[in-house]
């Protein structure tokens, strides 16, 4: 039950454990010294004229080699007065954008403005056209802003030239881009009232709210201003964080069935494989539940370990199940006899595997990086619950309900499935070998 309560991190994950001098230094540097104004808040670029990024040719194993090519909107137009007014209206709407979604009474959890409930910091919005108008008024006396805007309709070539001169002289390339003296994009830069590096459950609704605002402005935009793109690091990294969660469930969806097939092949018995599979599910649940009880969340290390648990937990059960099946090939058909042989021959080996694997992983407890500490704890938890389920669940269940005689045999001449009677798959029984070298089996 506790495993289902796992959620993405509620705070910013660090590289070092609490109490480490470097972690304490970062906390002191952040909390005890004056910062750079609003630098703790998410900085977002809202661009017009960009349809997207062409990633054709991108190589994921060489991410810095080729990042992609910008796809510009061929219909982009910032020259006409109507489009200039739309750009300015977006700037003003951002300044007055409240972080209370339509139809709701409470502001978003990520919104830190408890006074005005604003989603942005108005004084930190860079609206480049406003600076252009000031620049042009400084060069041409007694000209109004409306007259400057009208130049886009009456004398577009002059307007574009003045805009390009402004771009070159004022170094506003992040907000205004030209290609061959033709304007290709214009951007607004603003700070949201969302703090940097917030957990997924907080920032995802906030970004969805901003995306909805962008879509609403695009719907009412004139031709030439409909292609927009909002981006910031947290928006991009959000996909990575969501990918961790989806990767966990995809990994479990693949690894659990694969483990069951391995168990079917290794034990050659439907009942033995099914009991072992139930053990694995229990082990995964106990490990993930322990993570929740400890107070961890579903981060990178936990997601990786959750998939590793399946592979590690198969080991002990498949050894015991195989020995239970081998006992049947040796002529022991009663559950109690098979249980005794599996426990005596393979029990010490399973215990030794727990000691070696757990002992090897314990070395990572001495590491300073938090990731290795977590991996140590997760591996030790996995082998501990694997041992518990193997000796205290799997073997007892087989003692009470395990197959007797040839019950549940999957393939070979004694198969319970008629079409698999002629399939050997390496089964000694199908080859006519009724006895197994006990010493060799014990060694395995």
Image (cartoon, rainbow, N blue to C red):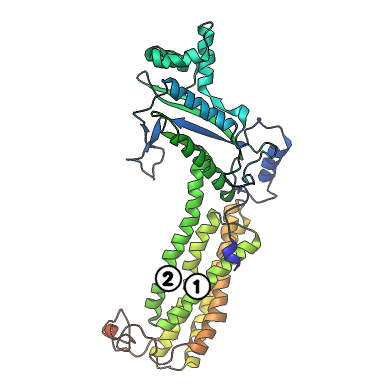
Q: Please give the name of the residue rendered at 48% of the width and 59% of the height, measured from the top-left corner.
A: 248
Side of 419 where 44 appears, left or right: right
Could you say where residue 258 lies in the image, as x and y percent from the top left?
Answer: 40, 69
Q: Please give the name of the residue rendered at 56% of the width and 49% of the height, measured from the top-left corner.
A: 200
Q: Please give the name of the residue rendered at 45% of the width and 85% of the height, measured from the top-left corner.
A: 324
Q: Looking at the image, which is closer to me, 424 or 204?
A: 204
The part of the image, by quadrant, that contains residue 122 is top right
Could you say where residue 337 lies in the image, as x and y percent from the top left?
Answer: 48, 92
The part of the image, by quadrant, that contains residue 361 is bottom right
At mark 1, the secondary structure is: helix
Q: Which quadrant would the C terminus be assigned to in this image?
A: bottom left
Residue occupied by mark 1? 280
Neighbourhood count class around disc 1 (C-alpha, 10 Å): few under 14, some 14–19, many 20 upward: many
Q: CA distance from mark 2 to mark 1?
A: 9 Å
At mark 2, the secondary structure is: helix
Q: Are marks 2 and 1 in contact (CB under 8 Å)?
A: yes
Residue occupied by mark 2? 259
Disc number for residue 261? none
Side of 253 where 198 appears, left or right: right
Q: Is residue 192 above or below residue 171?
A: below
Evaluate whether residue 438 shows in this view. no
Mark nearer the N terminus (2 vs 1) = 2
Q: Please give the name of the residue rendered at 39% of the width and 45% of the height, measured from the top-left corner.
A: 61
Q: Is residue 102 above or below residue 286?
A: above
Q: Which quadrant would the N terminus be assigned to in this image?
A: bottom right
Residue lying at the far right in this picture: please name it. 32
Evaluate whether residue 45 shows in this view. yes
């Amino acid at each position: 039950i506790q495993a289902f309560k796992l959620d993405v991190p509620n705070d910013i994950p660090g590289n070092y454990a609490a109490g480490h001098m470097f972690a304490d230094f970062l906390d002191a540097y952040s909390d005890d010294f004056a910062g750079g104004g609003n630098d703790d808040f998410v900085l977002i670029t809202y661009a017009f004229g960009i349809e997207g990024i062409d990633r054709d040719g991108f190589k994921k194993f060489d991410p810095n080699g080729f990042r992609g090519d910008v796809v510009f909107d061929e219909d982009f137009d910032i020259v006409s007065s109507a489009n200039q007014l739309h750009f300015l209206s977006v700037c003003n709407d951002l300044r007055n954008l409240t972080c209370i979604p339509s139809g709701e009474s409470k502001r978003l959890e990520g919104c830190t403005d408890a006074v005005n409930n604003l989603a942005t910091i108005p004084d930190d919005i860079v609206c480049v056209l406003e600076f252009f108008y000031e620049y042009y008024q400084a060069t041409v006396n007694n000209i109004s802003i409306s007259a400057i805007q009208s130049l886009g309709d009456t004398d577009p070539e002059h307007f574009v030239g003045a805009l390009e001169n402004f771009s070159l002289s004022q170094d506003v390339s992040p907000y205004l881009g030209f290609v061959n003296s033709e304007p290709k994009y214009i951007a607004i830069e603003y700070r949201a009232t969302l703090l940097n590096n917030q957990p997924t459950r907080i920032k995802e609704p906030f970004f969805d709210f901003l995306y909805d605002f962008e879509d609403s402005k695009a719907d009412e935009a004139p031709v030439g201003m409909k292609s927009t793109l909002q981006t910031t690091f947290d928006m991009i990294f959000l996909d990575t964080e969501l990918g961790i969660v989806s990767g966990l469930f995809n990994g479990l969806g693949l690894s659990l069935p694969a483990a069951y097939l391995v168990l079917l092949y290794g034990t050659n018995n439907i009942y033995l494989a099914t009991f072992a599979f139930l053990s694995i599910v229990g082990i995964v649940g106990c490990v993930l539940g322990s993570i929740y009880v400890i107070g961890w969340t579903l981060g990178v290390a936990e997601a990786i370990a959750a998939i590793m648990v399946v592979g590690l937990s198969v080991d002990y059960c498949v050894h015991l199940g195989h020995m239970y099946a081998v006992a049947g090939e040796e002529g022991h058909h009663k559950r109690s006899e098979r249980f005794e042989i599996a426990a005596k021959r393979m029990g010490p080996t399973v215990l030794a595997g727990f000691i070696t694997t757990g002992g090897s992983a314990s070395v990572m407890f001495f590491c300073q990086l938090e990731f290795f500490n977590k991996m140590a704890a997760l591996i030790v938890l996995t082998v501990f619950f694997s041992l518990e389920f193997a000796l205290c669940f799997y073997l007892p269940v087989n003692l009470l309900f395990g197959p007797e005689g040839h019950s549940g045999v999957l393939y070979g001449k004694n198969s319970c499935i008629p079409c698999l009677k002629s399939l050997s798959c390496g089964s000694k029984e199908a080859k006519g070998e009724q006895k197994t070298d006990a010493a060799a089996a014990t060694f395995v």
